[in-house]
């Protein structure tokens, strides 16, 4: 009987007509526009039409028509999908607009699914409809989901199995199949199944890839920024971006599922610290804030995110915490008749929270007028260690070095530096304990109009002690006679007498542009000055492994002032 039937699959590009209309006019499906490709992650509804040639050819015979009607009422169908021929690949993931090579890194897709939670490898419950039976056709409305295929699948193989549903005999209901297999020969048991109706139909359809996602992570003035570039790599259809988010990928902390269904957490740093939560990455407003965002063929759009994390880690936070990230893009196309939108998950580069422990910030009123005196307030947040002395030194002459600059650039830079006058170029702030903040105001005056930076050339000098495990006899602690007279300073020095191995000055200043290696916008160069003289006049013990502070623990934040001409 299977050879007497024609099998056809129809993938309509529009929603299916109501069931009542299909039953009243079975041939209506032939007028529907068809699709020639699908999208990974969408839910597809299609029709399998089984048409009996025997009933039409019989014409005057009643037996074939009666047999067909009886068979059609008992038929059932089930659809499945798998990856077609050709290994999964990246598709158009390698597309890169001109001029952006090396700036953005590719983000590979991890999972693509339709509305609702991602089901991973589990089964998706899809609706099952009864077939529509007509005189010479049986129409099976079927539904499949393309969210279980591997990322990068290029072809989808859709297989539909059709069979005749048999009614269980009384013997099977009473004794079950096990009793029949034990008391009868297998050939006798399954003889009736050999003539049952069984057929399998398959087709191969092209899958279009999801949008291409690229990522760039930068740090600007201590703020972690992430730029996501979404590219419509398809040259066939327009897509619309409905939402885009960045979330911590806590699943990366688990091992694969064990055979018994359990999972093992191998890294609980992110879970316990809570520094990066589900709402830590905020999309910044701007041109990317309008949704839906349409993208034509080969068009791209950038979205800017900022990590909302504290300047300093929480008390129980992990230093140098590295967090795995995932991006979720919600998108759709006009050619999705049964799926409102598709969600694609992408793996992003991990972000490392290396936050400085000693930060110098500056603030001032802006704009100010030429020749007008204005004040800049410098704030030092010390969560690094205790310092014997802290000094701020205005040294703009250090920025004019750099043999790579041409003569005109050096003159322009020198003119800009000469335009700002610091009234107190040397400021002693005293000692600084760990966990405290120092605030100091410095007066400036501008000689011409322009935009000037007031933090880059303010040199930060830190005098500190280094612990020594076994200092030599000549490097004994300070005596009472040589201790400062101030009770506060004396108490501070006494706290360090047991570990006083040397006193050292740390110079921190941002260099000229010719010496910069840009890491975000925090452009800094750090140098250790020679050790200062011992307070008691004897040479200091300098352990080789304690020669300097950690270079990534101190940072300065930018402060710019706009100077305008006075109103005449």
Image (cartoon, helix red, strand yellow):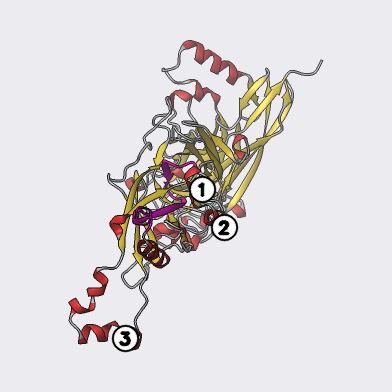
The Cα atoms of the two marked residues, 2 and 1, are separated by 12 Å
Q: Which residue is mark 3?
A: 171
Verify whether residue 36 appears in magenta.
yes
**Image quadrant where residue 107 sits:** top left
Q: Nearer the viewer, residue 393 or 344?
A: 344
Mark 2 crowdedness (10 Å alpha carbons): few <14, some 14-19, many ≥20? few
Query: Residue 426: within the magenta?
Result: no
Tell me the tag on residue 102: none
Q: Quadrant of the C terminus?
A: top right
Q: Residue at x 40, y 31 (%)?
A: 96
> Which circle's residue, 2 or 1, is located before the other in the chain?
2
- Image location of residue 455, percent across then percent down: 58, 32
Badge number at residue 20:
2
Circle 1 is placed at which residue position? 28
x, y percent for residue 159: 34, 55
- Range covered by the magenta-colored residues: 32-60
Q: Quadrant of residue 519?
A: top left
Q: CA distance from mark 3 to mark 2?
A: 39 Å
Q: Is residue 122 visible?
A: no
In the rendered image, the residue lying farthest to the right is 568
Alpha-carbon span between mark 3 and mark 1: 44 Å
Q: Is residue 270 left or right of residue 458?
A: left
Residue 337: x percent and y percent? 52, 47
Image quarter in which the N terminus is found: bottom left
Check the image and report above or below for 94 versus 472. above
Task: Identify the residue at horizontal 42%, vertical 31% (top origin).
Answer: 517
Of pointers 3 and 1, the one earlier in the residue sequence: 1
């Amino acid at each position: 009987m299977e050879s007497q039937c024609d099998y056809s699959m129809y993938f309509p590009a529009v929603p299916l007509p109501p069931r009542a209309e299909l039953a009243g006019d079975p041939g209506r499906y032939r007028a529907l526009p068809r699709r020639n490709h699908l999208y990974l992650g969408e839910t597809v509804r299609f029709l399998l039409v089984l048409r009996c040639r025997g009933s039409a050819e019989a014409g005057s015979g009643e037996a074939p028509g009666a047999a067909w009607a009886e068979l059609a009422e008992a038929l059932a169908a089930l659809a499945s999908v798998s990856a077609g021929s050709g290994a999964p690949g990246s598709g158009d993931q390698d597309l890169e607009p001109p001029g952006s090579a090396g700036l953005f890194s590719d983000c590979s897709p991890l999972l693509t699914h339709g509305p609702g939670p991602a089901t991973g490898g589990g089964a998706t419950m899809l609706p099952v409809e009864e077939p529509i039976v007509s005189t010479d056709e049986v129409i099976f409305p079927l539904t499949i989901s393309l969210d279980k295929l591997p990322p990068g699948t290029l072809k989808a193989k859709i297989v539909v199995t059709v069979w005749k549903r048999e009614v269980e005999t009384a013997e099977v209901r009473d004794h079950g199949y096990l009793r029949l297999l034990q008391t009868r020969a297998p050939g006798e048991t399954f003889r009736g199944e050999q003539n049952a109706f069984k057929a399998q139909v398959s087709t191969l359809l092209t899958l279009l890839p999801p949008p291409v996602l690229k990522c760039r992570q930068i740090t600007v003035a201590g703020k972690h920024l992430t730029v996501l570039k979404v590219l419509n790599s398809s040259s066939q259809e327009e897509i619309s971006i409905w939402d885009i988010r960045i979330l911590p990928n806590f699943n990366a902390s688990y091992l694969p599922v064990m055979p018994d269904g359990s999972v093992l957490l191998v890294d609980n740093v992110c879970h316990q610290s809570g520094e990066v939560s589900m709402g830590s990455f905020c999309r910044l407003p701007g041109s990317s804030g309008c949704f839906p965002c349409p993208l034509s063929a080969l068009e791209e759009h950038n979205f800017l995110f900022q990590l909302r994390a504290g300047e300093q880690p929480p008390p129980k936070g992990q230093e140098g915490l590295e967090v795995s990230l995932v991006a979720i893009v919600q998108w759709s196309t006009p050619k999705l008749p049964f799926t409102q939108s598709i969600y694609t998950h992408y793996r992003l580069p991990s972000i490392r929270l290396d936050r400085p422990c000693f930060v110098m910030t500056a603030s001032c009123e802006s704009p100010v007028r030429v020749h007008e005196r204005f004040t800049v307030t410098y704030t030092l947040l010390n969560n690094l260690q205790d310092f014997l002395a802290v000094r701020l030194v205005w040294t703009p002459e250090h920025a004019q070095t750099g043999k790579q600059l041409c003569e005109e650039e050096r003159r322009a830079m020198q003119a800009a530096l000469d335009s700002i006058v610091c009234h107190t170029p040397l400021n002693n702030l005293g000692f600084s304990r760990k966990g405290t903040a120092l605030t100091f105001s410095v007066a400036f005056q501008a000689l011409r109009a322009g935009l000037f930076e007031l933090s880059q050339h303010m040199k930060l000098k830190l005098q500190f002690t280094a612990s020594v495990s076994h200092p030599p006899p000549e490097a004994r602690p300070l005596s009472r006679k040589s201790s400062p007279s101030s009770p506060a300073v004396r108490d501070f020095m006494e706290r360090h007498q047991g570990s006083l191995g040397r006193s050292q000055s740390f110079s921190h200043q941002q260099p000229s542009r010719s010496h910069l290696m840009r890491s975000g916008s925090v452009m800094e160069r750090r140098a250790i000055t020679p050790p200062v003289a011992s307070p008691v006049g004897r040479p200091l013990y300098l352990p080789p492994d304690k020669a300097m502070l950690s270079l990534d623990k101190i940072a300065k934040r930018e402060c710019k002032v706009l100077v305008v001409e006075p109103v005449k």
